[in-house]
Amino acid sequence: MLPFAYYLLKVIIISAILFGYYWFLLRNKVFHAYNRFYLLAIVVLSVSLPLISFIIFHNEANKPSVVKMLQVVSAGDEYMDEIIIAVGSKTKFNIIDSLPFLYAFVSSVFFIMLAQILVSIFLLLKKHQKVNLENIYFINTDGAKGTPFSFFNYVFWNKQIDINSPTGGRIFKHEIAHVQQRHSWDKIFIHVILIAFWSNPIFWLIRKELSMIHEFIADKKAVEDGDTTAFAAMILQATYPQKNFYITNNFFYSPIKRRLMMLTKNQHPRMNYLSRLLVLPLLVIVFGAFTIKIADKMYKESASSKLKSKIIVVLDAGHGGQDAGVTNKNGVTEKDLALQLVKKIKALNRDENIEIILTRDIDIYEDPRGKADFAKNRNADLFVSVHLNNSPSAQWNIVSGLQVYVAKEGIENVEKSKVFGTSIINSFKSNYGLPVPSTLEQRPKGVYVLQANSFPSVLIEAGYLTNDKDAAYLLSEKGQATFAKNVLDAIINYALQNESADQILEKKNLDQDTPYYFNGEKVKKDELELKVQGYGKIDVKWYKPNEASIRFKTTKNEIVVDLNGRKDSIKSTRKEILKNDTNRLVFTQVENEPEFPGGKDAWRKFLQTNLNGSIAVKEGLKSGSYTFITKFIVHEDGSLSDFTSEKNINDSIAKHCIDVIKKGPKWKPAIQNGFIVSAYRKQPITFVVSEE
């Protein structure tokens, strides 16, 4: 029920905004055809806009207020898919479970009312003879209640009114106008909408206004060549009570004062044009607010500095688990803040050629040897470890700022690490809210995670957690976004420098006549791609100077061709690559989200069937609502991995949610730019525990 309630809330907000514009600028104006179209458009837009989604990327810093507003409106969209599991200590009536049935019951009442009216009209039609007047059917009744009225191409007349009299002629012309303008379609449409959205008060107001506009249009047609005064007098004479079928156009049903006012009102062309024109900026704002999802990107566009080859960057959040690292006087721990910073770096990365892998994305402990091995096993090109600094109590709130460490002298990677570390310092110097040094730091005893790697590795002390100013800055959204942006800029700048040198090396290797080895066979340069294409169409090829090899990614395989005479061949099959998806780019925002087989309804049914609500009671959760957010990756082949719980209230329940999702079938993968990609999926699951 919650996803529909959230959707319904958006429908009400959109309709209220658009109807408010009508009420203050368009209501009681004489451009009735425009108002009719606008009111119908309100209904269509209100129902459809919350179902449309466009993703745009925007800078995290210095967002215009309109962008911030759009982000607020779309921020809760992930909860549209929330699953609610209600449970009590004893089996009992639960009001949350009953809400969908209550809503459906009221909808069914309105459906029955519509059916009854249609049956009543059908009985009138069956009881009386109809006359065809140029595709308009005239039914002369014996004074049936509600007559005269029109419904689609039928005009139901009352014999007590002489159609040949001046009054009768005008009334008949009035009803013919309803038929010709197809007003019955509007009434049926709005009633069907109200069956599903009866809880939206704005739609009821729209129905009332739409009926009035129908009367204004028909009145205008009826007096086009006649006497306005006489027609007004005729309306005033209609004082006897009438029954109204609200899906029909009844002549004697409408507020008399407004009809008379509209008959005699003069137009002001300039004001009318202006009031209609003002709707355009309003529609743009509403469309943007309810269809656009904002995703953050780096401050500067990287199009001009786009990397040509892929690099893998392993980010390490220092400490974790039982090792909290530094803890300041407010209880903020180094392990938590470091994790926030590396997650922000990954979230802001929008360069598809920079693949970021985290050593941890939850609060767990990993020893330094394990972190170094992790980076090696992921074929990392760069390694960045993020920490927060400490100071003696006498220097709290005195020492401040950033520090960047590289391995001690004599270590294999130290020279390359110095180049990378210098790139980091230069990036932070231009944009950081804390002091930035001009030189790199090296510890005499070294740092294991830096010296155990053969590739460039640095350790960044983002600031002093024992300094209130540093801590406040790094806990702020602006501070974290600035830190992340600077690290990403440093990565790009360092990689671009290397690519310039790599292009020279690549040209040298490709121009020489040394042989290439493919599947153990010596091949010539011009034969190489033909050999590779035998394993599938080539999607991407790139050069890795540190491996002295050329890589080809095809539709089936990833292939490495060695340039040093070793007899390398197919590195791994496509299937194996997909299984080890941590080495591949995983999207957080995509054009088409990954989908459970059968769609959202099937996914909801699967979870509600397999989740055991009693586990919440078993784990001792008190009466209340508890939301768990399970995050996982849907790979290109539809398999799932990397399950984590982002909002973990209870380990056992979080594990139960993950275990249930793991048992499901393969998913339909995400689509980005026309390609099947791996993507993250978040699933909120709420356990509602009721009292006995």
Image: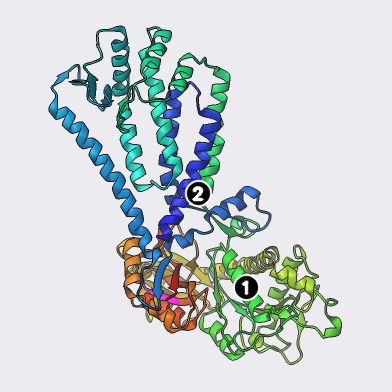
Q: Quadrant of residue 95?
A: bottom left
Magenta stretch, residue numbers? 638-642
Query: Residue 641 or 139: which is nearer the viewer?
Result: 139
> Three-letter amino acid code at disc 1?
Gln
Indicate the quadrant containing the N terminus: top left, top right, bottom left or bottom right: bottom left
Query: First in sequence: mark 2 or mark 1?
Result: 2
Q: Main secondary structure of the magenta part?
A: strand
Q: Is residue 481 above or below residue 15?
A: below
The image position of residue 299, as x and y in percent, is 65, 58
> Three-letter amino acid code at disc 2?
Phe
Residue density around tag 2, few if under 14, some if 14–19, many if 20 or more, within 10 Å: many
Q: Quadrant of residue 46?
A: top left
The image position of residue 70, as x and y in percent, is 57, 51
The image position of residue 595, as x and y in percent, is 37, 63
Give the number of the disc on residue 290.
2
Indicate the quadrant containing the C terminus: top left, top right, bottom left or bottom right: bottom left
The image position of residue 333, as x and y in percent, is 68, 80
Of helix, strand and loop, which one carries label 2?
Answer: helix
> How far apart in space, not on screen, are marks 2 and 1 (Cα)?
29 Å
Give the residue at x 23% y 20%.
157
Give the residue at x 37% y 7%.
225
Give the residue at x 41% y 48%.
199
Query: Residue 13 or 241: which is nearer the viewer?
Result: 241
- Identify residue for label 1: 340
Of helix, strand and loop, which one carries label 1?
Answer: helix
Q: Can residue 562 be seen by looking at this rendering?
A: no
Q: Is residue 270 above or below residue 526?
A: above
Give the residue at x 59% y 64%.
348
Q: Is residue 50 magenta?
A: no
68 with respect to 133 (left or right): right
633 with respect to 161 (left or right): right
